[in-house]
Amino acid sequence: MSLYTPDRLEPSDGTDVVGVDQRNGEDNGRNDGDGSQRPTVTVVVPAMNEAKNLPHVAARMPADIDEIVFVDGHSVDDTVEVAKSLWPDATVVTQSRKGKGNALACGFLASTSDIIVMIDADGSTDPAEIPLFVGALVAGADFAKGTRFAAGGGSSDITFSRKLGNKALNVIVNLKFGASFSDLCYGYNAFWRHHVPVMALPSVDATEAQWGDGFEIETLINVRVANAGLKITEVPSFEQDRIHGESNLNAVRDGLRVLRTIRSEQRVSAADVFPAPVSRG
Ligand SMILES: Nc1nc2c(ncn2[C@@H]2O[C@H](COP(=O)(O)OP(=O)(O)OP(=O)(O)O)[C@@H](O)[C@H]2O)c(=O)[nH]1
Ligand SMILES: [Mg+2]
């Protein structure tokens, strides 16, 4: 069944279905066989030692995703072999440095579709929700921001202290940047690929570690997208527990990196975007 069927999506494991997007047919990426055109979709999957989780992710992936870009974080298990067997047509990239941020930057660079969706490989973000994100973009958003804290979203994974920390960070970002995020630190998002330049991600070619290489990446992207005045639509999403293995995130260390990101990014005001004309007295 198609990613863009009007009412339902069937993940390839044939289990739960979710409601899907509207399609307005304005973007012309791929012919669906019935004469209609739709934007193409790349799913970027950063993964470090996720071999046991990948079959669960693959089972929930919509069958007609155009491109999978799989970004390996120098895994020491057989993550890459499992990924290649599950997605024989995937573009498999080894990231240039360390960290999820660098993995995403490498993944975005390798993507070729109209739309990029970023998901996790630990089974916590459900690929069967992808049509909801694509639907938000097709309906007019520039950036579809996943949120666990809107009606229809949720989490079985987040702890009380992380929820509190996330809430505080949302308040700070929304005040400083005039945004209205409800889930700043959630990494399930989608956007039109032509917006990648506004994210100004660190070059993948640098040999030294760069700011933005770590888990601060989501905050960095969110703040820069908001600063650029892009239209952000929040998409309710349900986060499951990581299935196997350990989280790579350290709430204190990475929370401080998020705070540093918020502090160092400057709000761009309307005056910066549209400077007043210089009078020539
Ligand atoms: N390629 C690559 N992937 C990474 C790296 N760090 C994390 N990831 C992947 O990024 C995704 C999210 O990482 P997690 O460790 O689950 O962190 P999290 O989801 O923010 O935190 P939890 O909610 O505690 O699971 C997973 O698919 C990881 O395998 C990295 O350095 N390189
Ligand atoms: Mg996780």
Image (tube, rainbow, N blue to C red):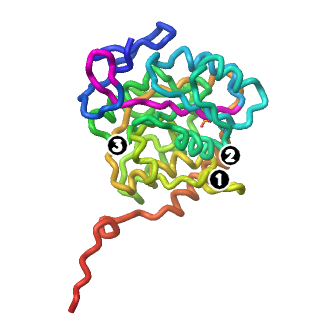
Range of residues picked out in magenta: 31-48
Q: Residues within 10 Å of mark 3 (few under 14, many from 20)?
A: many
Query: Pointer 1 and pointer 2: residues touching (CB < 8 Å)?
Result: yes
Label 3: which residue? Answer: 142
User: Splitting the image into 4 quarters, where does residue 54 fall?
Assistant: top right
Q: Residue furthest right?
A: 76
- Residue picked out by circle 1: 205
Image check: 107 left or right of 16? right
Q: Is residue 214 left or right of residue 228?
A: right
Q: Quadrant of the N terminus?
A: top left
Report the residue at 65% width, 53% height from top: 205
In the image, residue 153 sits, relative to residue 2, either above or below, namely: below
* Circle 2: residue type: Ser
Residue 37 highlighted magenta (yes or no): yes
Q: Residue at x 35, y 56 (%)?
A: 178
User: The disc labelled 1 sits on which kind of residue?
Assistant: Asp
Q: Position of residue 143 (x, y in %)?
A: 38, 42
Mark 1, secondary structure of its residue: loop
Instruction: Return the disc, 1 or 2, that comes first in the chain's sequence.
Output: 2
Q: Secondary structure at mark 2?
A: loop
Which sits earlier in the primary sequence, circle 2 or circle 3?
2
Q: Nearer the viewer, mark 2 or mark 3?
A: 2
Membership of 35 in magenta stretch: yes
Give the class, few, some or many, for how many residues have Cα within 10 Å of label 2's Cα (few <14, many ≥20): many
The residue to which callout 2 is attached is 96
Label pair 1/3, CB-CB below 8 angstroms? no
